[in-house]
Structures are given as structure tokens and as C-alpha cells.
Amino acid sequence: MGTEIRVEGLTKKFGSQLIWNDVTLTLPAGEISVMLGPSGTGKSVFLKTLVGLLKPDAGAIWINDKNLVTLRENDLYEIRKLFGVLFQDGALFGSMNLFDNVAFPLREHTKKSEAEVRRIVMEKMDLVGLTGAESKLPGEISGGMRKRAGLARALVLDPEILLIDEPDSGLDPVRTSYINQLFIDLNAQIDATFLIVTHDINTARTVPDNIGLLYHKHLAMFGPREMLLSSEEPVVRQFLNAQTIGPIGMSEEKDADELASEIGQELPPLPPIALQLGTSDGSPRRGQKPAGEWCRTHGVTPPPGSFQSKNAGVPGVSQVPAEGPYAATLASADSGVQAPTSADATQGTTAGATS
């Protein structure tokens, strides 16, 4: 069963350097959320702060009615047992085989017998598709397999919260698709709360229930997937649709001359919203809503062609027709209503932030 995380007014600095300020959001229990942002905006710092590895300069992180920021070390240690963390490179011990890597948290933090450890490790390795690879060393397997081994290790203590840092880093598009499907299937099976940090637009458009965007030292927007994918907020629109026109430049922010040169340029239309990735076996997930529900509920017209394809709007990917339980879903909503901006970020099931 997943656990809700409520973040209020979180601020982090390193010396005089502000990383982000006044971040406020709620990660709903049992749902998949993705955090996006240009390089250097502090996404990984945000993950480390959530798990208590870094202490914020202001704000609160509420889990089970406890504020992690003010907890004593012993109490924080107990709360950390709710978390599983998948680091960018898997963070496996190079001298240990995969079995021992996955077993490490059980041997360090529990008093289980070796028979129990073996049962749990083999169960988690089977869950991520690594049965038969337990005797291999990290250097003997592919990057995708190392990611899955790191995920198995993150799962051995049955976490209620999974923090996943750049799971697509170093993976080709095919293996990224496989690991995205694995996240969806795992979420349905274990009902944990997922937060994924990524740069991958395909992942952001098709996997999560909620999307957040860190930009220019603040949270530009956070909310349900359809809210951000139909947003006309300039920075959100530019990033989620991989466009060059907008406030984001090569050095995070464009200067006045760059912005002036774009005046009068017509923005490309918003691409259609793809159907959200479903589970492999068609089983339901708690966080997955009917396609188009948020747009319909809030009177927002989605981009033309939305919810008709699994890959609609994904750059460089041909469309795959909708099938199964999503084949007859909404293609468009009532017209004449403006798309959401950052001011709408408090709508829906999650708490928003100031932009």
C-alpha cells in the first residue's frame, strides 16, 4: 500500500546558491509521478531531500503525519524503511554478484534467515525479469539489466515509496520502453507511491499519473498528466513538447535578445495526448484514470487527435492505434475553454505550487 508524501514550502540551498525555493506539492498514495526539468535544476537533490539524505533550509515533508525535517536520527531511520531508491547507475557493488547485491539490504537491516533471504531475493529478481542471472557480476551484464537489479534491490524491503532517479540514463529507446512497462506493472502489483526523475519526454507523456516541472529555482507546475500535457504555460509547453520556442535556452533561461527574436513567431500546435501506458495484462492500477477524464471534468479541450493512439504526440514515434479497454475513449472535449496554466496547478487530485 503506497503512502502519500506532502511537501510544503521546501527550500534548499548549497551555501549562497539557491537550488529551489518554496516547493509545494502532494505525491498521491499509490500513484506514479514524474519530476522533469532542465539539467541542473535540482531534481536529484529533490529526491535526496525527500528521503532525508539532505536537509532542506526551510519547509516540511509530511509522511504518515510525521515531518521528516524535524525528526531525530533514530526516527528518521525508521521512516526511511518506507523508501526504496533506484539510483541513476543502479549503484551496485562491483565485487558482488547480483544475488548478493539484491540481498544486501535484507542482511543489513533485518534478522531474516538465509532461507528467507533467498526466497525474497529470488521473488524480487523474478519480478524484474532477472531469474537465472543471480550469479553474474554487474560488469558482466547490460546497462538495462543493472537497472533492473538495482530495482530488485530497492524492492526487497517491500517499500511503500519508490524514488527512481533517471532510469532511462544510458539506455536505448527499446530498453527504456521495457523499463517503463516494468514500472507500470510493478505499480499495479505492489501499489507503492512512485516518483521518477527523468528527461525522457516519451516517459513523461505516457507513464505517469502526475507530472511536475522544476524550472528557474521553483516548481513551475505539478498536477495530473492531462493538465500539463494540455497546458499553454510557456515553460511547460516548451519542455513537454521538446520545442525550441519558449523561455528555456541552452543555459536554462534565454536572454532578452533571444526572447525578442521569437516575438511574432507562431508556436507549433500542441501535439495530441497519447493514451497512458497500461499494464501488460490489462489489470487496473489505482492511479490510472479513464482517458480524457481530467480534460472533460475541467472543461479543457485536449489537442486534436488526443487519446486515439498509444504514441500520439511522442516525437519520432509512429502512432499505434488504440486497442483494448481504451479503444472507445474520448477523442475531444467541449470546445471553447482555455487550456490550463500554472494558476490551475492546484486543481485535480494533487496540490500545486506557485509559478
Image (cartoon, helix red, strand yellow):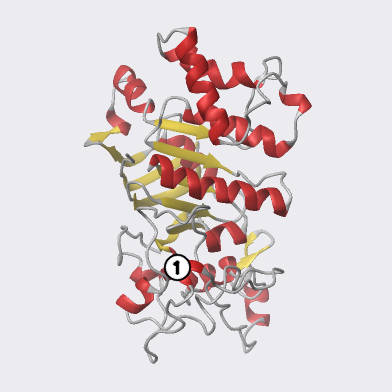
User: Which residue occupies 52% across, 73% down?
Assistant: 273
Q: Position of residue 217 (x, y in %)?
A: 49, 53
> In this image, 316 relative to 101: left or right?
right
The secondary structure type at the circle numbered 1 is: helix
> In this image, 131 relative to 293: left or right?
right
Q: Position of residue 111 (x, y in %)?
A: 40, 8
Mark 1 — residue?
A: 325
> In this image, 12 relative to 91: left or right?
left
Answer few, some or many: residues within 10 Å of disc 1's Cα (few below 14, many 20 plus, some between 14 and 19): few
Query: Which quadrant of the figure contains the C terminus?
Result: bottom left
Which residue occupies the extreme right position in the image? Answer: 140
Which of the two residues, 320 or 254, is positioned nearer the viewer here?
Answer: 320
Which of the two residues, 214 or 110, is positioned nearer the viewer here?
Answer: 110
User: Does residue 317 sit above or below 126 in this rendering?
Assistant: below
**Amino acid at the residue labelled 1:** Pro
Q: Position of residue 344 (x, y in %)?
A: 34, 71
Which of the two residues, 36 or 194, is positioned nearer the viewer here?
Answer: 194
User: Does residue 294 sit above or below 151 in this rendering?
Assistant: below
Question: Would you identify the image quadrant in which residue 59 lies?
Answer: top left
Which residue occupies the extreme left position in the image? Answer: 65
Question: Would you identify the image quadrant in which residue 79 lies?
Answer: top left
User: Which residue occupies 37% across, 51% down?
Assistant: 22
User: Which residue occupies 44% across, 52% down?
Assistant: 33
